[in-house]
Image (cartoon, rainbow, N blue to C red):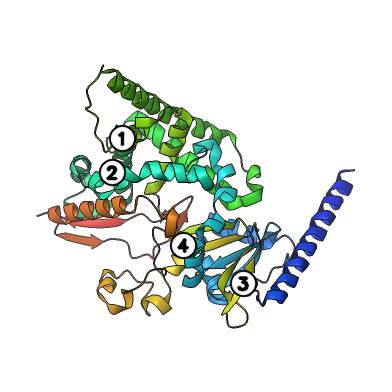
Amino acid sequence: MLPESIFIILAVATISLWARTWQHARHRRRHGYEPAPRYRHTDPFFGFDLFLKTGKDYGENRYLPELSKLFAQYGNTFEAISVGKRSIYTIEPENLRSIFVDNARTWGVEPIRLAPMEPFCGRGFLTVDGDLWHRSRRLFGPSFEKRAIADFTALESFVEKMLPRIPRDGSTVDMQPLLSSLFIDATTLFLFGESIGQLAESIDSTRVSKAFDEAMYGSGMRIAMGPLGFLAKSNKWLKACQECQSFADQYVQKAIRYRHELQSGAARRKQSKNILLYSLAENLDDTEFLRNNILQAFFVSQVLPQNNRVALANTTLPVGGGPRGKSPIYVAAGTMVCVSYYTLHRQERHWGPDAAQFKPTRWDDDVASGQAYPYLPFGAGPRQCIGREKALMEASYVLVRLLQCFPHIESRDSREWQGHVQLSAQNLHGCKVAFTAI
């Protein structure tokens, strides 16, 4: 009985896929659209061959360079089948502008992110589209303006805690965990009004940090698995999600109580205006809304090597179709588009023959001038990373403080940067350097 049921499901799915493909092909011919080059599947119906390859690449920490190889093979825009659905991969600047800026309302994230992330951080500015997204985004705006993030007093206190942990005799140190701890402490202070004490390596901070890591890793894995995300093991992940929510809830309740005390005259204003949660709680009593958005704000500190969108309605991409990649592409509602920042930022046509090299001076050259959509570390358009200015200012501040204390910095790792991708990406080998003090 079971094999017969599976056969019927597969037959219906195959007929449905064929019907949609025929209908879309007819529409493309009628309006002069042309398809992009297509990935050569061994499973042309469901695309499980590419799905399994992607999973293998993730496990071996080769996903990012392997995806770059596909762009090199098929061009700046190509199509593939992902678990029975059409997906488009693109790094074409004209398409990115169309997706992120010009036609941003036509593209969304809720079909990709909400189900995998809701157990962790619910419905908020990172997981939904439409009115709720607009409401969340507006509330965040004032807390990320330059005037609100230009005070480095708190950040300096964490830098002073980190500096004694750096060897001053030229011995090798991995700065990746130290910098990660510093920014986790700074971020939690900004979000909740209290740091979790990651640099101090307290028992509570280690427990909370592990819960956040597990929750974000599990969410990222389920996003990558798409419709098959339900197959991922859930017990450990759900426990971590619950711990993160409980951690945030205690601060949400504290912020709401403090606001009520201010309104009743039982307390004087003493909390910093730079605490995001207290700013959000000034006019809200919706604890779930506050908790969801404050947890999602934690993602602002993450580095994303890829950004995906789903077409919310039938639409088009301006280029990428046809033999020369210059024709518009018809995109049916529900189609996912994958944008690889990792590949985009290493394109020789934009950055020259040394595009893959670390070269800070390239920003002094003409080649980097006027580069907008070929360089999108924070995204673009209405959903551009709201923490962009904060991230740039804090990274610059910490770098300058390190240079003030250590005039000589030497790399102690000759290996190429290798991306360890979860929800975000970091170097698999860490950041091993040596410092010499003044």
Residue situated in front as seen by the camera: 261 or 37: 261
Query: What secondary structure is marked by label 4?
Result: helix
**Which label sits in the foreground, 3 or 2?**
3
Q: Amino acid at mark 1?
A: Glu
Residue that mark 4 sits on: 101
**Which label sits in the foreground, 1 or 3?**
3
Q: Where is 240 relative to 254, above or below?
A: below
Percent position of residue 184, x then y = 33, 41
Percent position of residue 372, x then y = 38, 69
Q: Amino acid at mark 4?
A: Val
Counting residues from the start of the chain, the first of labels 3 and 4 encountered is: 4
Residue that mark 3 sits on: 329
Q: Quadrant of residue 430?
A: bottom left
Q: Could you classify mark 3 by the number of other residues whose Cα lies within 10 Å: few (under 14), some (14-19), or many (20 or more)? A: many
**Which label sits in the foreground, 1 or 4?**
4
Residue that mark 1 sits on: 201
Disc 3 to disc 4, how far (Cα)?
A: 18 Å
Q: Amino acid at mark 2?
A: Leu
Numbered badge on residue 182: 2
Q: Quadrant of residue 375?
A: bottom left
Q: Are marks 3 and 2 in contact (CB under 8 Å)?
A: no
Counting residues from the start of the chain, the first of labels 1 and 3 encountered is: 1
